[in-house]
Image (tube, rainbow, N blue to C red):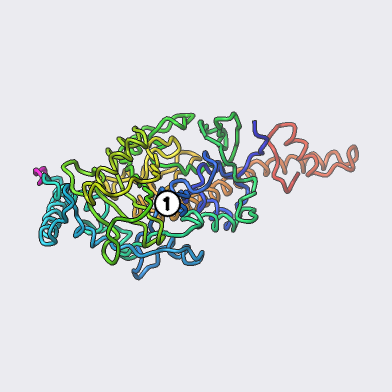
Amino acid sequence: MDSTKRCSVIIVGAGVSGISAAKELSENGVDDLVILEASDRIGGRIRMENFGGVSVELGAGWIAGVGGKISNPVWELANQSGLRTLFSDYSNARYNIFDRCGKIFPSGLAADSYKKAVESAIHRLRNEAANVDEPATTPKTPIELAIDFILHDFEMAEVQPISTYTDYGEREFMVADERGYEYLLYKMAETFLLTSEGKILDNRLKLNKVVREIQQIRDGVSVTTEDGCIYEGNYLILSVSIGVLQSNLISFQPVLPRWKTKAIEKCDVMVYTKIFLKFPYKFWPCGPGKEFFIYAHERRGYYTFWQHMENAFPGCNILVVTLTNGESKRVEAQSDCETLKEAMQVLRNMFGPGIPDASDILVPRWWNNRFQRGSYSNYPIPMINNQVVHDIKAPVGRIFFTGEHTSERFSGYVHGGYLSGIDTVKALLEEMKIENKRSSESQTFLLEPLLALTSSLTSTQTETVPTLHKYELLRQIFLRSNLGLPEAIL
């Protein structure tokens, strides 16, 4: 059992929301906190790994929402930290669509197919919002399926107004820094945690602590980790993904109320997999408008969206293909060798049989990671601004919930997680003020009759107990009655 004394706040999870919450607490004078992180690193779904001699982002890789009248807070952090980023222009991708024979679809056909797909999506969304049950046009041909995939998995901003883009701007920047996207979290952490040479040494951050049970106790919360350690705090901020909340990793005593679990169950979990392939040399088109390209297949989402990394890291000879949801889960369940075989066949369909074999492959597994269970939350369109979102983020007793899934305007984005941590702490600080006021009024209520009693006792016992001060007598009365005293009186 860990010998850590009871603290003011326990934070479960050291992703962007957990770190921003801890920073906000510290800036408001609450330094008596403990952060419990299940893995061996901070960052959560922001994760860098060295592959092919460069730093690649397995999880979040872009800062979305830049260039508007209001500055994105994560973009500000990136600028303050000198993080290297590159502008990403997806608009040309629809004109780089390959068929199974390696031919690029004519730009006119691609533009027409894209326009029809957008119109169909807008029509469907309006029907959903109005609760109109009308059969939707289903994409059938390979190019229709490919465009439907990139439209709904990459360019939803063009179909409906998303707060990220309406508030912060429509531009997106890819993080291409050897220090990784996670460098922003380390810069945040070093403002309130003890660090040295880029490493966090502060004992308040505890890595490899897998929380398995959260119990609400009298005037606090008790947390039990997988290795048998127990931590107690006055309050708890739960900064785990919506996927983890939907899993059985953490049990609650007492169990969460039905209104809370029902809301959690209703939120969709998206799985987003970036597969990295290293080659001895590049064989794909480069240059302006060629960074992204599409593979049209009769199966929707089958190795559809590709990107070369030459703009980010010249000479790296790395390709990235993005899978989502069903395809992600399918690939996670098979061997990397099988995935490499599939990807190479797709590339040979596009660029010919003479291209070289990849020398290495990296396949992240977000769905099968029990500490993540997915990539990000996705609220169905009719559910946005619904009571479900409010119920997911609402506290239960002394347990406060945070994370990108609790952000009403920015769910699914890094800045959504960052801002949710700050918002959760603001709500917690208000609760602390109310609790302190309630405690002060309760102590006053108890002290007034006891002060009257001690005044009476000391007036009659002055000769027999001349040195007994009324506050000393009061202290003894409290100690004997186990009521406890305010520190000022003790």
Q: Does residue 134 show up magenta in the picture?
A: yes
Residue 240 image point, x, y percent: 45, 42
The N terminus lies in quadrant:
top right
Q: Is residue 443 above or below residue 421?
A: above
| Residue on which the image places disc 1 | 57
200 horizontally vs 104: left or right: right
What kind of residue is marked 1? Answer: Glu
Residue numbers of the magenta segment: 133-138
Residue at 57% x, 57% y is: 28
The dominant secondary structure in magenta is loop
Residue reaching furthest front? 354
Residue at 76% x, 44% y is: 490
Q: Does residue 120 show up magenta in the picture?
A: no
Residue 354 image point, x, y percent: 26, 48
Residue at 44% x, 29% y is: 255
Q: Is residue 74 above or below residue 452?
A: below
Residue 451 image point, x, y percent: 72, 43
Instruction: Give the crowd class for mark 1: few <14, some 14-19, many >=20 residues within 10 Å.
Output: many
90 horizontally vs 131: left or right: right
